[in-house]
Image (cartoon, rainbow, N blue to C red):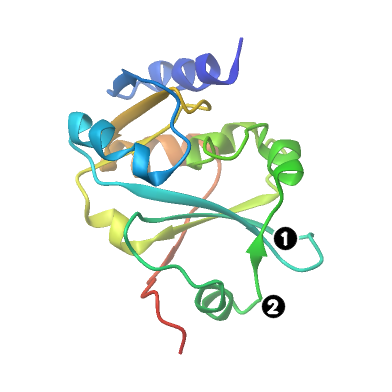
Amino acid sequence: MDKKEQILTLLRELPVEFDLYEHAAVFTMDDLPDIVAKLNTPLFRNLFLCNRQKTEFYLLMIVGDKPFRTAEVSKKLGVSRLSFADEGLLFDLLGVTPGCVNPLSLLFDTEHKVRLLIDRDITAWPRVAMHPGVNTATVAMESSAFFGTVLPRLGHEPTLLDITGVTE
């Protein structure tokens, strides 16, 4: 069973109501507005980060149009400056490629090496949307189902951060 089917199976077994939208492959944020409009959700970015030593890994889900500064997130976490992890680490830890990473990818983090960080502003949105392991489909669900059912099943307690986009 491929990653997409594993994720969809998980959502169905929980059970969580979700909308599935199949579409052409998307590679950038510019490709997404039509998709999220059809699913009635905001646009989010998911960033895979690591420390300099590549021993600590983080998946940050942030509101799509919000500026992101690694220094701000590093300071809030009390860790040395974070940077973007390379594609090899992303694939080794979560089994996905760039453009497909998001909290649903944590299904494949069986050793719990990745820490989930979520921009607190996301909790105010009624719905969330993300790719189910591939960039040719998007699932959307109620935020309450995502935070209350999906994340607990994945075993990754999110750390909520107040992201301002400003480095103090």
Above or below for 159 versus 40:
below
Name the residue nearer the viewer: 29 or 1. Answer: 29
Q: Helix or strand or loop: what does disc 1 sit on?
A: loop
Name the residue nearer the viewer: 126 or 164. Answer: 164
Above or below for 131 versus 33:
above
Left or right: 38 in relation to 25: left
Image point (37%, 27%), residue name: 138
Residue 98 image point, x, y percent: 59, 40
Q: Amino acid at mark 1?
A: Glu
Name the residue nearer the viewer: 96 or 58. Answer: 96
Residue 122 placement: quadrant? bottom left
What is the CA distance from the residue labelled 1 to the residue labelled 2? 10 Å
Q: Amino acid at mark 2?
A: Ser
Q: Helix or strand or loop: what does disc 2 sit on?
A: loop
Badge 1: how crowded within 10 Å, few (<14), some, or many (20+)?
A: some
Residue 159 image point, x, y percent: 48, 61
Image point (58%, 75%), residue name: 74
Residue placed furthest toward the bottom = 168
Report the disc number at residue 56.
1
Image point (52%, 38%), residue name: 99
Q: Are marks 1 and 2 in contact (CB under 8 Å)?
A: no
Left or right: 52 in relation to 79: right
Residue 160 image point, x, y percent: 42, 63
Report the disc number at residue 80.
2
Marked residue nearer the N-terminal end (1 or 2): 1
Report the disc number at residue 124.
none
Badge 2: how crowded within 10 Å, few (<14), some, or many (20+)?
A: some
Image point (22%, 30%), residue name: 39
Quarter in which the N terminus is drawn: top right
